[in-house]
Amino acid sequence: MLIVYIFNFLDRQIVNILAEPIKKDLGLSDTQIGLMAGVAFAAFYTLLGIPIARLADNPKTDRIGLIAGALVIWSGMTAMCGMAQNFIQLLLARIGVGIGEAGCTPAAHSLIADMTEPAKRPAAMAFYALGIPIGSLLGMLIGGQLADAYGWRSAFIAVGLPGIILAFFVVWLLRDPRKVEVIASASRQKMPQMDSKQAFAEILKSKGFMLLLVAGSAASFLSYGKGTWTTIFFQRTHGLSAGETGFWFGIWGGIAGIVGTWLGGWLAARYGAVDRRHVFTAPAIGMALAIPFALASYHVADWRLSLALLMFPTLLNSLYYGPTYSSAQGLVPLRARAMASASLLFCQNLIGLGLGPLFFGMLSDLFRPMAGDESVRWVLYGAAFLGLVPAFFFWRAGLRMNEELDQKG
């Protein structure tokens, strides 16, 4: 499942490093880049996430087959991005990627939660979430190098086609535990399927989950927005090529993200076992501590120093993945787990991936008459300060964990 999630984020995030070459080739505005990178993907990803989650929560559904089918769709549509001849065609292909990827994570989270005891769940979810920084790292490296050598179209095709092959290995190697007759029988007898109204009612009962929803959405908004425009910042302000940006930013940012994601899961499991309030202590502190490092990174003139400084906020802002996704599974009943995951992903992707890159792009266009090519730097300054918002809500969510986490069957 980690390998599948790596492909998921590779195909999702490669557009960031290719955004500047696409802009120049197709003559797009920064707002159009934001639409293509964010809204086109996120709108359909979020809309389809809920019904697919209901399907994943059904005891009769083979979640492995669901994930494999989704993998074929998003991989094929990623390759189609490389064949687009204009903005509309590229937008439609990105929509196709979003449709496919909607079938992955809710089912994967449900699978992992079924196979993992609660005490080990933060670490297990953090391990799965390593697909985010690893996939983003590979997207930067592969996308940047292929874009410099062969063009942005070849980069999309090269990363899309292998995912179709991977889907066959997923079906061959993995098994849904619900396929085992004893487990499936127990599920049908003891845990009948909740309807959507019941599942949402259970989710809304949890004050901890609602705080987590706000915190995760705010963190996602900043993460996706900064992720897209920081790569453009290094190309536009510091004069790096797509390949150079992908190589250096991909490697160092990827390493920082991997360490932060793993560390966040380990800290939540280690200290959350003693006191559940500490499940979100590291994310809350990390989001606040990241601000001065981010501001310094965007301010310095040397791109090497900027990149070195950026590793610290990248690490600190990655601490929330494992605790967030594992807690989402522990704050709701078993029969609503995929729905809880889909609800969290709905808000994170609609607000984060959908609006983050677009909002930052609109601000960049707004500041351009005053700031010129420095408009992206101005936008990133403001984004750094907004890190206080998720920090506050992660702290508030942590206060609810002793009362709510893993109290529901």
Image (cartoon, rainbow, N blue to C red):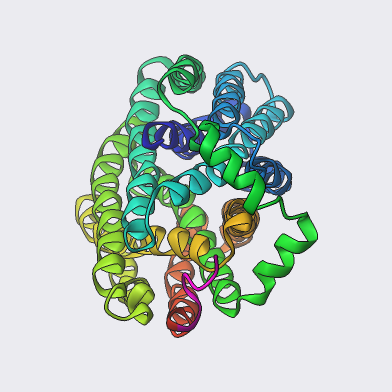
Percent coordinates x, y for residue 158 in the rendering:
44, 17
Residue placed most toward the observer, 304 or 199: 199
Percent coordinates x, y for residue 63 in the rendering:
57, 34
The quadrant where residue 74 appears: top right
Residue placed most toward the observer, 50 or 288: 50
Percent coordinates x, y for residue 188 in the rendering:
66, 44
Q: How many marks?
A: 0
The quadrant where residue 217 appears: bottom right
Q: Is residue 292 above or below residue 128?
A: below
- Examine the rendering and report whether any part of residue 280 can be seen: yes
Q: Is residue 213 above or below residue 10?
A: below
For the point 67% across and 46% down, which residue is it?
49
For the point 57% across and 71% down, which residue is it?
209
The quadrant where residue 10 appears: top left
User: Position of 218 compared to 190: left or right?
Assistant: left
Percent coordinates x, y for residue 365 in the rendering:
62, 55
Most prominent secondary structure in the magenta stretch? loop
- Quarter of the image where the C terminus is located: bottom right
Residue placed most toward the observer, 146 or 300: 146
Q: Would you say residue 380 sits in the magenta stretch?
A: no
Q: Is residue 20 above or below residue 316?
A: above
For the point 65% across and 54% down, which residue is it?
350
- Quarter of the image where the N terminus is located: top left
- Examine the rendering and report whether any part of residue 20 can be seen: no
Q: Which residues are magenta?
A: 403-409
Q: Would you say residue 407 sits in the magenta stretch?
A: yes
Residue placed most toward the observer, 153 or 408: 408
